[in-house]
Image (cartoon, grey):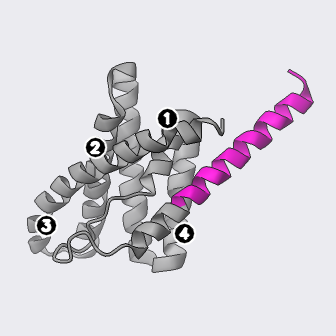
Amino acid sequence: MSKKDDNYTKTKRLVLTSFIFAMALVLSYIEDSLPPIMAAVPGVKFGLSNIAVMYALFFLGRKVAFSIAALKSFFVFIMRGFVAALLSFCGGMLSLTVMLLLIYIFKDKISYLLVSVCGAVFHNIGQFIAISIIYSNLFLWVYLPILLVSGVFAGIVTAVLLRFILPALKKLV
């Protein structure tokens, strides 16, 4: 491969990564514009921007996925402040680590759906751990089952939507 081809490949990868990051930001903005899923349960969301992170993990590699998750957290810091960014970062990093482990252990024998559900559940667990450190109130433990159940539903929604938009995203590569 010539240096020109190598530069083209690097540029194409950078542009694709930037596009996927922009997609994550747009999905996050759209989700924030929607009415709350359950007004009685604060913080429960589908996690639409995680579609972009999952795509990056499956098709662009773990480094890109971790980069997008970290950049997403930085964006959250700018838009919503430190606590929200900490929750985003802790949830995102734990989620990605668990998804990566599942993919490594089970290779091609695991479905997007199961990876997505586990990722969403562990995203909520990571956020719960972070918030438990900030607010050391035992009452928070009552909220954990709600987060786990909502994580399962969010993971299903994320996997279904990823499958739906995958054909369009594959045309980019």
Question: Is disc 1 surrounded by few (<14), some (14 to 19) or many (20+) residues within 10 Å?
Answer: some
Of the two numbered discs 3 and 2 in the rendering, the one whose residue sits closer to the viewer:
2
Q: Which residue is mark 3?
A: 143
User: At x 20% / y 71%, what residue is drawn?
Assistant: 38
> Taking the image as drawn, is residue 61 in sight?
no
Q: CA distance from mark 3 to mark 1?
A: 31 Å
Is residue 134 left or right of 101 when viewed as pictured? left
Residue 117 marker: 2
User: At x 39% / y 21%, what residue is drawn?
Assistant: 107
> Taking the image as drawn, is residue 123 in sight?
yes
The answer to if 17 sits in the magenta stretch is: yes
Q: Which residue is mark 1?
A: 58
Residue 162 % position (x, y): 43, 43
Of the two numbered discs 4 and 1 in the rendering, the one whose residue sits closer to the viewer:
1
The answer to if 132 sits in the magenta stretch is: no
Q: CA distance from mark 4 to mark 3?
A: 26 Å
The kind of secondary structure element at disc 1 is helix
Q: In the depicted view, which residue is nearer to us: 105 or 28?
A: 28
User: In the rendered structure, which disc, 2 or 1, sits on the residue that comes first in sequence?
Assistant: 1
